[in-house]
Image: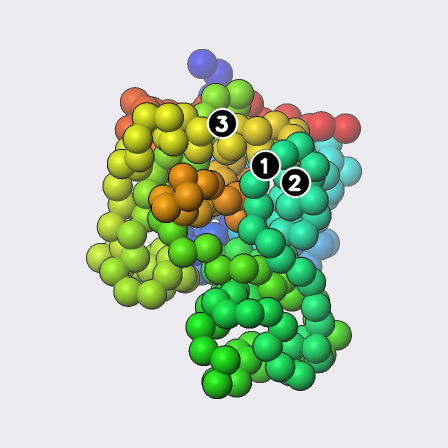
Amino acid sequence: MSKKNIAVLMGGWSSERGVSLVSGKGIAQALRENGHTVQEIDVTRDINKLIADLSPAPDVAFIALHGTGGEDGVMQGVLETMSIPYTHSNVTASAIGMNKVLSRKLFKHIGLPVPPSKVITVAALKQGHPMDIPYVIKPIADGSSRGVYIVRNLSEPVPFDSNWEDSKKVLIEEFIDGREIQVGVMGDKALGAIEICPLEGFYDYEAKYTDGKALHKMPAPLHEEAYQRALEIGLKAHQVLECSGVSRSDLMYDETKDQFYLLEINTHPGMTPLSLLPEIAAHAGINYNELVEWMVRNAQCHQ
């Protein structure tokens, strides 16, 4: 295997900056262990600095960015313009995958099950409860469960982030009382499904990135038919967006109805020590360094 000059893009300016830095450091270490020459780039809003950091052009840009500016098509567009092959999905798939409303429209169109939901402004949210309890409030385009609220009591004020402007649109979703199942996809294959069991509350930012806050059950202890159905949903979500590389789909499983609900797809899954895609891949016999190597080998420009 030929060795490459690889730029690992990490950091960024989203609320997930810290997670991105952890992912990026792990990826860079794995790439060096694999024999590649690695440049770590802490990405900011300074586009001139980024262009300078990417000159001369590396063989591959490994996108370890999360959230706004990193997995929403923005960075992918920069790399397409500079003709630098990059990991993960293209501009369109990244942008749609990041937008929960647009992606759900596609999922629903091809018959994938999604929870009942609607979109309202924060101004409307301030007027009172927009849906019968229990329901969930979510940002339309954010990750790591930032800004997610589960509402169970009509006598309490509607919760929301005080930094949200009145004109901001949010997703209001029927709460699915069920088991949290995540499906990892690599290329054209669903690798497996894992169940996440938070010790308290739901699988929020703290539970995702704090050791000991959630139990990981790999493989997810579902009956065989349900397990295969989960894999099919994750793979179809990956395919309808025409994702490249890896993805991870988040599902809820209502065991009483034997029904899955697809919440969202992550076109740039985390690669931290507690991240789910590497754990799913490891169970399938693909260790962290092998996973990273495969992603580099499948990097490309799409336009």
Residue 282 point in image, percent of width and height: 30, 30
Disc 1 element = loop
- Quarter of the C terminus within the rendering: top right
Residue 190 point in image, percent of width and height: 45, 26
Residue under pointer 1: 112
- Residue lying at the far front of the rendered structure: 257
> What colour scheme does the image use?
rainbow
Q: In this view, does 68 lie to the left or right of 259?
A: right
**Residue under the point 53% across and 48% down:** 263
Residue 134 seen? yes
Is there a contact, CB below 8 Å, between mark 1 and mark 2? yes
Residue 288 seen? no
Residue under pointer 3: 232
Estimate the spatial distance between the alpha carbons at disc 1 and disc 2, rounded to whole Å.
5 Å
**Residue under the point 67% across and 52% down:** 101
The numbered dot on residue 108 is 2
Estimate the spatial distance between the alpha carbons at disc 1 and disc 3, rounded to whole Å.
10 Å
Residue 99 point in image, percent of width and height: 66, 51
Crowd around label 1: few <14 · some 14–19 · many ≥20 (10 Å): some
**Residue under the point 31% across and 35% down:** 222
Q: Which of 58 and 12 is in front in this view?
A: 12
Under mark 2, the amino acid is: Lys
Under mark 1, the amino acid is: Leu
The numbered dot on residue 133 is none
Q: Nearer the viewer, residue 155 or 165?
A: 155
